[in-house]
């Protein structure tokens, strides 16, 4: 009998024990947390004074240390012999159990996958059991905003009045999704994004521990790419370290991460300052050929102009988050850039950014923006509002000999047609007739609207000299002197016509009053007094406030100084309202009961 023995090749020792940097260098004490000094100091002071809340809410972007601080806080409050600095001793049984991940006092729940009511009820049942070692049982609920509405409601009472040995730490990246009733029961700690300098310092520390050579500019690019998250920064650091085989260089980082090099933006700005449009477009073509997105390129260009602007003044220089060598290049180029040029260029890039998604020809939009930026420093460039709102006017790119055609001399107004222009040496048509048509001076005939003709159908005696225009564009007769003025006679039809005209011409903010007037009809009581009937006191109040302006309008339109308007609240029997289909059928059935029988026989339903 033969026995086959399969001898497996052992794994490489480095591969077997490899731990990613984000886990290997995860902070274990408050002092080792990066970029959250104010929060860690507050937590340490609360532990030192024994003023611990029963519920905390840690909120902020991803990878800034929320869960890490929750674990450190849980370990420290259960430490049997904390040191003088308020940190855990890492020697007692509670600390060792925590470090070996076998502590029964610290429970973590991922609310993203355990977000039902049953999960919360199970958690509530565990809360009742006191701790065996240490003083507190700490429950860390990560991504708490993922809990369902019913789970939140089931958790409210326990969160408000937990046992004295229970402390809840809730962590979330979306604070706005948490119920206000939960927020009011917690102490809220807002974690900030970690700035570039702190991230670079920590990455350099990790590189020294791992024996990796790293350039400062390369680490700066990694920190900017991480966008304030330390976990993302360490993940990118591991990726680039593998790509460069332990020698992280600036060129290796931009190649691996597909990041646009600063060199492109510096070259492009030099082209803009020299008005080199064609070179700028060719450089854009080179960038697009390498697979970069045009939108990403424009946002980077806008950031480059912003960095140049903050580099012009030593006061704003700390806002520039780049490496030392790149900082010097920014300062040198900023001195060559006029402040108005930077304002205009940032405005153009921002407009391109806003219009990029809706543009049908995205490349053309970017090229037009580059052309405008390259023409900003020309002597005759637009200068509006300190350069913050440049006109989008393009100048010719190629210098060509353009034929200049002399403008014809102005002729006297009485002349009907000007003589044809004589060919000269300046217009490029020596010895032959100009192809342009002869320009003629024509008299402009005034065009009158029908409403501006001084003839009134209702009042034939009104002349053109008696007409004046209102802001709404409607002509109004001018009231003559007292001796010449005669009140005209009008009827209810004329009154309703101008009543509706007044309502239509009301501005948009008077929409409610306009609708009320359209639904109301004036009633002429005598020769000069008309009445408006409304349904309630509130409508009467509004209509009464409008009496002066309506009277003035009617007096001018109807040419009668004695027109008077009154408002009255209608009695209940006078109010006529619209009936529904069912109400109308019921009224008809009362007059003719056979309709009800007919409906029952035909089995009709009223809608």
Image (cartoon, grey):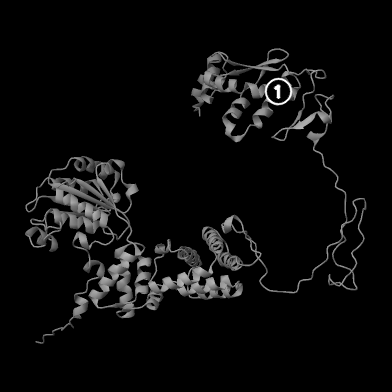
Q: In which image quadrant can residue 457 be found? A: top right
In the image, taking residue 120 as reference, residue 310 lies left or right, namely right
Q: Position of residue 174 (x, y in %)?
A: 33, 51
Q: Position of residue 61 (x, y in %)?
A: 33, 57
At x 89%, y 56%, the residue is 411
> Is residue 514 visible in the rendered structure shown here?
yes
Q: In which image quadrant can residue 191 be found? A: bottom left
Label 1 Cα neighbours within 10 Å, binned few <14 / some 14-19 / many ≥20: many
Image: 209 above or below 359? below
**Image quarter (top left, top right, bottom left or bottom right) of the N terminus:** bottom left
At x 82%, y 33%, the residue is 453
In the image, taking residue 495 as reference, residue 569 lies left or right, namely left
* Nearer to me, 266 or 285: 266
In the image, taking residue 55 as reference, residue 440 lies left or right, namely right
Image: 30 above or below 291? above
> Which residue ends up furthest to the bottom in the rendered image?
2
Secondary structure of residue under mark 1:
helix
Image: 449 above or below 219? above
* Nearer to me, 498 or 405: 405
In the image, taking residue 12 as reference, residue 264 lies left or right, namely right
Image: 255 above or below 232? below
At x 55%, y 20%, the residue is 541
**How many numbered marks appear?**
1
Q: In which image quadrant can residue 363 be found? A: bottom right
Residue identifier under label 1: 554
> Is residue 122 visible in the rendered structure shown here?
no
Q: Position of residue 325 (x, y in %)?
A: 40, 74
* Nearer to me, 5 or 288: 288
Q: Position of residue 89 (x, y in %)?
A: 11, 60
> Which residue ends up furthest to the front in the rendered image?
314
């Amino acid at each position: 009998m033969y026995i086959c023995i399969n001898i497996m090749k052992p794994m490489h020792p480095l591969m077997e024990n490899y731990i990613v940097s984000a886990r290997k260098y995860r902070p274990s004490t408050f002092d080792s947390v990066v970029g959250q000094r104010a929060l860690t100091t507050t937590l340490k002071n609360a532990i030192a004074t024994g003023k611990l809340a029963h519920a905390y809410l840690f909120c902020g972007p991803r990878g800034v240390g929320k869960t890490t601080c929750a674990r450190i806080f849980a370990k420290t409050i259960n430490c049997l012999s904390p040191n003088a600095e308020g940190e855990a001793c890492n020697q007692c049984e509670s600390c060792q159990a925590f470090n070996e991940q076998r502590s029964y006092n610290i429970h973590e729940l991922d609310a993203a996958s355990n977000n039902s009511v049953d999960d919360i009820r199970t958690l509530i049942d565990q809360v009742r059991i006191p701790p065996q070692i240490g003083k507190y049982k700490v429950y860390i609920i990560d991504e708490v905003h993922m809990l369902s509405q019913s789970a939140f409601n089931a958790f409210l009472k326990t969160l408000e009045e937990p046992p004295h040995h229970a402390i809840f730490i809730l962590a979330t990246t979306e604070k706005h999704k948490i119920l206000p009733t939960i927020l009011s029961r917690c102490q809220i700690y807002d974690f900030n994004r970690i700035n570039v300098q702190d991230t670079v310092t920590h990455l350099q520390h990790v590189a020294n521990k791992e024996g990796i050579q790293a350039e400062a500019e390369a680490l700066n690019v990694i920190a900017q790419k991480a966008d304030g998250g330390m976990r993302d920064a360490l993940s990118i650091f591991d990726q680039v370290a593998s790509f460069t085989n332990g020698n992280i260089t600036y060129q290796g980082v931009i190649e691996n991460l597909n990041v646009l090099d600063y060199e492109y933006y510096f070259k492009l700005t030099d082209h803009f300052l020299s008005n080199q449009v064609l070179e700028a477009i060719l450089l854009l073509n080179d960038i697009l050929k390498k697979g970069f997105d045009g939108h990403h390129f424009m946002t980077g260009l806008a950031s480059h102009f912003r960095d140049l602007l903050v580099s012009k003044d030593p006061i704003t220089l700390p806002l520039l988050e780049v490496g030392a060598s790149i900082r010097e290049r920014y300062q040198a180029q900023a001195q060559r850039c006029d402040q108005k040029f930077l304002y205009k260029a940032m405005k153009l890039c921002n407009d391109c950014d806003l219009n990029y998604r809706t543009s049908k020809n995205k490349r053309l939009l970017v090229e037009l923006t580059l052309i405008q930026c390259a023409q900003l420093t020309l002597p005759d460039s637009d200068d509006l509002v300190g350069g913050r709102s440049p006109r989008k006017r393009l100048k010719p790119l190629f210098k060509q000999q353009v034929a200049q055609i002399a403008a014809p001399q102005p002729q006297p107004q009485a002349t009907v047609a000007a003589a044809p222009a004589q060919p000269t040496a300046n217009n490029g048509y020596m010895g032959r007739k100009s192809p342009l048509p002869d320009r003629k001076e024509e008299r402009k005939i005034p065009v009158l609207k029908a409403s501006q003709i001084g003839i009134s159908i209702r009042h034939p005696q009104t002349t053109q000299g008696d007409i004046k225009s209102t802001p709404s564009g409607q002509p109004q007769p001018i009231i003559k002197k007292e001796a010449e003025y005669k009140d005209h006679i009008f009827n209810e039809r004329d009154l309703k016509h101008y009543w509706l005209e007044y309502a239509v011409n009301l501005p948009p903010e008077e929409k409610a009053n306009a609708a009320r007037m359209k639904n109301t009809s004036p009633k002429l009581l005598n020769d000069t007094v008309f009445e408006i009937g409304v349904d309630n006191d509130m409508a009467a109040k509004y209509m009464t406030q409008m009496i002066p302006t309506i009277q003035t309008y009617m007096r001018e339109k109807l040419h009668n100084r004695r027109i008077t308007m009154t408002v009255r609240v209608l009695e209940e029997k006078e109010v006529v309202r619209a009936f529904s289909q069912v109400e109308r059928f019921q009224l008809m059935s009362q007059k003719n009961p056979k309709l009800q029988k007919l409906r029952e026989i035909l089995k009709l339903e009223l809608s």
